[in-house]
Image (tube, rainbow, N blue to C red):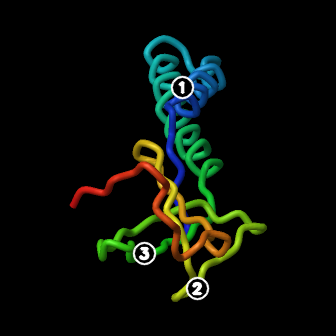
Amino acid sequence: MDIRGETSGLGGMAGAAAGGIALSGVGQGSGNAAAILGGVIAGALLGSMAEQSMSNRVGIEYIVTLANGTTVTIVQDQPPEDRVFQAGNRVMVQTSGSYRRVLPADHLPTQVNRPAGITVVD
């Protein structure tokens, strides 16, 4: 799955400046102004498209059923060296703010003893 990159606007601004400068020597009077405006518009579009395509990346979508029965869908970057999880693999979901990532849980125990001094209230 491809994850579409985000744009910051810098590519569009750089493209607009480059397009305006590139066509600033074309024509005279109002023709020159039209050429500059056309260069700014075309440059902004091309710069924005270039920035967005440079931030595209390969990703993978996981649908995970949590221990409490809730199902979540997580789309994450998938670098070539990362493990691709299959149905039935034990995983954990790392959450930090709105960021979520699926990680292996093979190394985690399936049962733990309650720590001393802890009371569980249901």
Report x, y in % for residue 66: 38, 72
Q: Amino acid at mark 1?
A: Met
The quadrant in which the C terminus is found is: bottom left
Q: Earlier in the sequence, mark 2 or mark 3?
A: 3
Q: Amino acid at mark 3?
A: Val
Name the foreground residue: 35 vs 119.
119
Q: Residue at x 47, y 45 (%)?
A: 96
Residue 93 vertical placement versus 117 (above, below): below
- Classed neighbour count for the residue bearing mark 2: other residues with Cα under 10 Å, few (<14), some (14–19), many (≥20): few
Name the foreground residue: 35 vs 55.
55
Q: Are marks 3 and 1 in contact (CB under 8 Å)?
A: no
Residue 64: give its label.
3
Q: Residue at x 47, y 32 (%)?
A: 41
Measured in 3D between alpha carbons, the distance from the residue under mark 2 to the one under mark 3, in whole angstroms, is 11 Å
Residue 26: quarter of image: top right
- Classed neighbour count for the residue bearing mark 1: other residues with Cα under 10 Å, few (<14), some (14–19), many (≥20): some
Measured in 3D between alpha carbons, the distance from the residue under mark 3 to the one under mark 1, in whole angstroms, is 40 Å
- Classed neighbour count for the residue bearing mark 3: other residues with Cα under 10 Å, few (<14), some (14–19), many (≥20): some
Residue that carries the numbered disc 2 in the rendered image: 86
Q: Amino acid at mark 2?
A: Gln
Name the foreground residue: 3 vs 76.
76
